[in-house]
Image (tube, rainbow, N blue to C red):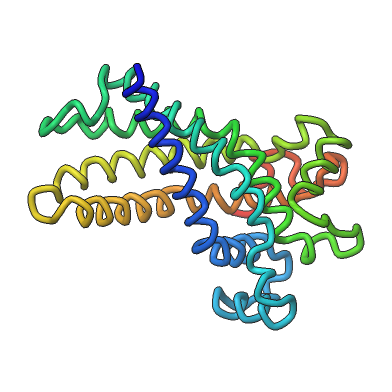
Amino acid sequence: INAEYGGVFSDVLGGTFRGIAMVLIGHPLDTVKVRLQTQHHKSLYRGAIHCFKNIVINEGFFALYKGAASPMYGAVLFSSVFCFAYGQAKQLVLGTNLHDLKQQVPPLYKLALVGALTGIGTSFVNGPIELIKSKMQVQRNIYPSQGTYKSSIDCFNKIFKEFGLRGLYQGIYPTFIRNTIGDMFYFGIYEISKYGFAGYFPGTLSILLAGSLGGVAFWTSIYPIDVVKSLMQTDSSRSCDRKYKSLFDCIRKVY
């Protein structure tokens, strides 16, 4: 039992540091991504580099880290839910832990199903985290006349106080779709690649290469729905003022 809990603790702790590292390294690029996805005036940013330079010049370097506190605070909770969901999905689909399979490679469709179930489970936590992050990242662009949130906590408190739990799940449907499809591709490609690379590269390098391929598969498969998610989450918190009335309305207007 102690070994089992020790393994879970290690996974959660490792996932927490992974989440923090991802925020510190990747959040500026994520801010640029969200700004480009949600700009209502297409001439505002001519591309990713122009957007990056524009933010730094006009708002300062640390503006690239707007909303970073939300995923940073949520790293422990998300990692815990992620590890639990992934473990339960593996038990349900494979009937065992992947580490117990040794050299036996599970079928790709089973690995993809494990990823899909994990994505569904984590969306309940990931949804509010992404919502706060996105609203902080774009608030100067979309809501210049409505004031600004002082921090991620301030954003959370104001949304929850005025709109309740439902307000924190604005844009949850595209989040479900994104995480389900994305994790299906990520874990399917990651696990298969890790087994394939194991015989050619040292352990750490094979994991890094597999993770890179998994990441490419994730973003390639979900980017269109990620645009929809960003637009719906950065829309007005008041349902009567929203430009996009539903998931299908947003898809129709964007594509």
Asked if residue 175 is positioned above or below residue 59 in the image, the reply reads: above
Residue at position x 68%, y 45% in the image = 131
**Image quarter (top left, top right, bottom left or bottom right) of the C terminus:** bottom right
Q: In terms of image quadrants, where is residue 73?
A: top right
Q: In the rendering, at what x and y percent does residue 177 appear?
A: 52, 37
Nearest the eye: 105 or 225: 105
Could you tell whether 8 is left or right of 16 in the image?
left
Asked if residue 33 is positioned above or below residue 243 in the image, the reply reads: below
Nearest the eye: 157 or 238: 157
Q: In the rendering, at what x and y percent does residue 21 appear?
A: 48, 56
Residue at position x 41%, y 43% in the image = 14
Residue at position x 64%, y 64% in the image = 65
Residue reaching furthest to the left = 199
**Image quarter (top left, top right, bottom left or bottom right) of the N terminus:** top left
Could you tell whether 124 is left or right of 81 in the image?
right
Q: In terms of image quadrants, where is residue 4?
A: top left
Asked if residue 189 is positioned above or below residue 67 in the image, the reply reads: above
Could you tell whether 236 is left or right of 8 in the image?
right
Could you tell whether 152 is left or right of 82 in the image?
right
Residue at position x 40%, y 49% in the image = 218
Asked if residue 25 is positioned above or below residue 127 in the image, the reply reads: below
Nearest the eye: 187 or 158: 158
Q: In the rendering, at what x and y percent does residue 12 appear?
A: 45, 36
Q: In the rendering, at what x and y percent does residue 230 appear?
A: 64, 51
The number of callouts visible is: 0
